[in-house]
Image (cartoon, grey):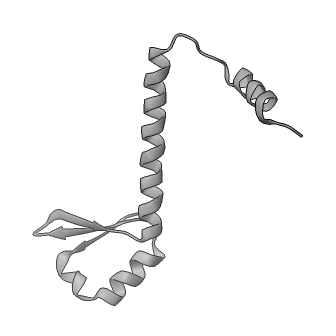
Amino acid sequence: MPKIIPINELKNTANISNFVEESDEPVFVTKNGYGSMVIMSIDVYEREIAKNQIVKMINESLKDMDKDDSKTSGQMFISEMKSKYDHK
């Protein structure tokens, strides 16, 4: 479950830093009862960026598939790639 804290708790930087580093989720910070910012560890940030990039690549691929009428099954594609690049 994500942690939600008021902005005045940011004064205790050591505790917040420790919690963020140990947590696998972002910490949501509120100001006057409304969402203001999100704090997360570098690992969580990089994971979220990677997820976004994957989603973007999948969406671009789906658009390309709609444009191109020549589609190949996954099994056929793998076979073609193995024959082309597997030089054992």
Write the residue at 30% across / 87% down: 13
* Camera-side residue of 54 and 31: 54
Q: Is residue 60 above or below residue 24?
A: above
Q: Is residue 33 above or below residue 79?
A: below
Residue that protrudes farthest toward the right in the picture: 88
Q: Is residue 38 above or below residue 10?
A: above
Residue that protrudes farthest toward the left in the picture: 32
Res. 40 in view: yes
Q: Is residue 80 above or below residue 57?
A: above
Write the residue at 43% across / 69% down: 42
Write the residue at 20% across / 75% down: 6
* Camera-side residue of 40 and 6: 40
Q: Locate residue 23: give its quadrant.
A: bottom left
**Image position of 38 (left or right of 60):** left
Q: Locate residue 49: give its quadrant.
A: bottom left
Q: Provide residue 73's location: percent of width, then percent of height.
A: 67, 19
Where, quadrant-wise, is the C terminus in this rendering?
top right
Write the residue at 48% across / 34% down: 58
**Image position of 69 (left or right of 76):** left
Q: Provide residue 27's location: percent of width, then percent of height.
A: 33, 69
**Image position of 10 (left or right of 2):** left
**Count of number-bearing discs:** 0
Res. 24 in view: no
* Camera-side residue of 40 and 85: 85
Q: Provide residue 50's location: percent of width, then percent of height.
A: 47, 52
Where, quadrant-wise, is the N terminus in this rendering?
bottom left
Q: Provide residue 19's location: percent of width, then percent of height.
A: 40, 79
